Amino acid sequence: MTSPSATPAPLARTAPAEELGAWQDDARRRTLALVEDLDDAQLIGPYFATVNPIRWAIGHVAWFHETWALRHLRGRPPLHPRYDTLFDSFQVAHAQRWQLDLPDRTATLAYLAEVKAAEERALAQLPPDERATYFHRLAVYHEDMHAEAILYDRQTLGYPAPRLLAADAAPASAGGGPARVCGEPWPGDVEHPGKRGFLLGATPDQPFVFDNEKWAHPVDVAPFRIARAPVTNGEFAEFVEAAGYAREELWSIGGRRFLATTGARQPMRWARRPGGGWQRRAFDRLTPLAEHEPVAHVCWYEAEAYCAWAGRRLPSEAEWELAATAEPGPGGTVGDHKRRYPWGDDPPAPGRAQLDATRLGPLAVAALPAGDSAFGCRQLLGNLWEWTADAFYPYPGFVVDPYREYSAPWFGYHKVLRGGCWATRSRLIRSTWRNFFLPDRCDVFAGFRTCAR
């Protein structure tokens, strides 16, 4: 069982060894909690194009820590030289990972513990400087991302929900209000004035950002209207019931290819209920579809087709980030201060955003008003990732970071998502974060909000 994460403290470029060690402990508790109930067969599982064998993922997490925090940073020799041929994700093809001679469960967990102990000794021997802080944080953030991916995998494979800290907890209340608010809709648009010269991207004063967020550069954003909340299950069900999946004119060429390949006629987790209506699969269980929760497990093509049907469109990256970070200026304009989070510069807290898997699924769209942006958008951070209209490309002047494989191989092929989801760690997310997936991915905890045309 894991324990609730403390509200993360403001970050500095150099962190004390105690803080880095605490982050490592917390990330490791989460990783182990996500796999402790799985048997040996489940830790490998069947081949899927969108998942990894979970035992391989555990070894890869350990290998990544060792590679960056010990070998790259401190020049240490490899603990197990053959593991480079097993756990380097850019040397081992995805489909090959089920065929590898992997260490067994005991040896894999032992490797995880061995690397962690070596990191702890290294931190104790020499106080971390800015460079060491960067690579230890990189390893923790990478583990956080894989913990979220293991939840995707468990969902895709139909495994039971993991026994995390709040697996059986009641839904969170809406920003301190009664829990019943979580069951309400939150319709309507926000009128946004746009901004000339909006600085899209991260600024150098941030203690840690990934290379694809660098650096803030001016873009002009025209006035726009964006939905106060993401599209709900109830709204998307209207599209499904209107034969939206059968209307070819609503789908792009890529979307039609997605339909032909998958045979989809509704979102991948939906099924008809006996007697009418819809239910959805959450891990290994079927539950009634919650009308006012945001629609989840829809790919970019499905979001695009819904928008065509509804006479709407997806927001651009710049519109999304402006909606999340802008503060009002004089005379109905946007000011120059850019918030780190929609609600301000204070870090995430449970009353503002649904993060850290404190509830194994999204809240309804009216929940958490304390997390609203300055212009009135709700749940821009947490709950579900949100597809944007844009393809994933580098910002002007892009320079690859030491972890060269993080962004550069994927430019041009993927679509950008923003905002994090209920499984994302709060220490990881910020409004400039750019996630990216292929447009046919339905396994991600992702939905979308729309803009007026």
Image (cartoon, rainbow, N blue to C red):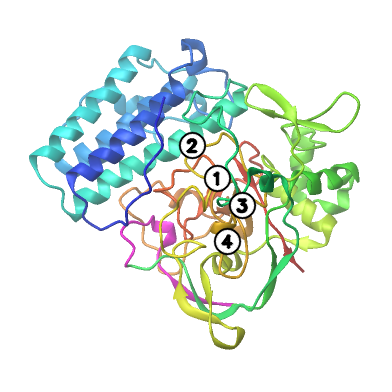
Mark 2 touching mark 1, by CB under 8 A? Answer: yes
Tell me the kind of residue under disc 1. Cys
Q: Nearer the viewer, mark 1 or mark 4?
A: 4
Mark 1 touching mark 4, by CB under 8 A? Answer: no
Secondary element at image label 3: strand
Q: Label 1, on which residue?
A: 421
Q: Please rate how many residues cluster around mark 3, counting C-alpha atoms within 10 Å: few if below 14, some from 14 to 19, many from 20.
A: many
Mark 1 and mark 4 lie on one chain; the one further toward the N terminus is 4
Mark 1 and mark 3 lie on one chain; the one further toward the N terminus is 3
8, 263: nearer the viewer: 8
Q: Please rate how many residues cluster around mark 4, counting C-alpha atoms within 10 Å: few if below 14, some from 14 to 19, many from 20.
A: many
Image position of 159 with respect to 312: above or below? above
Q: Is residue 208 magenta?
A: yes
Q: Nearer the viewer, mark 4 or mark 2?
A: 4
For residue 263, say whether it is visible: yes
Secondary element at image label 2: helix
| Residue 117 placement: quadrant | top left
Q: Label 2, on which residue?
A: 148
Is 17 left, or right, of 95 in this rendering? Answer: left
Q: Whole-Å distance between the Cαs marked 1 and 3?
A: 9 Å
Q: Nearer the viewer, mark 3 or mark 4?
A: 4
Secondary element at image label 1: loop
267, 369: nearer the viewer: 369
Q: Whole-Å distance between the Cαs marked 4 and 2?
A: 24 Å
In this view, the residue farthest toward the front is: 178
Give the magenta-colored segment's residue range: 205-220
Q: Label 3, on which residue?
A: 386
Number of callouts: 4
Tell me the kind of residue under disc 3. Glu
Tell me the quadrant of the picture where the C terminus can be found: bottom right
166, 144: nearer the viewer: 166
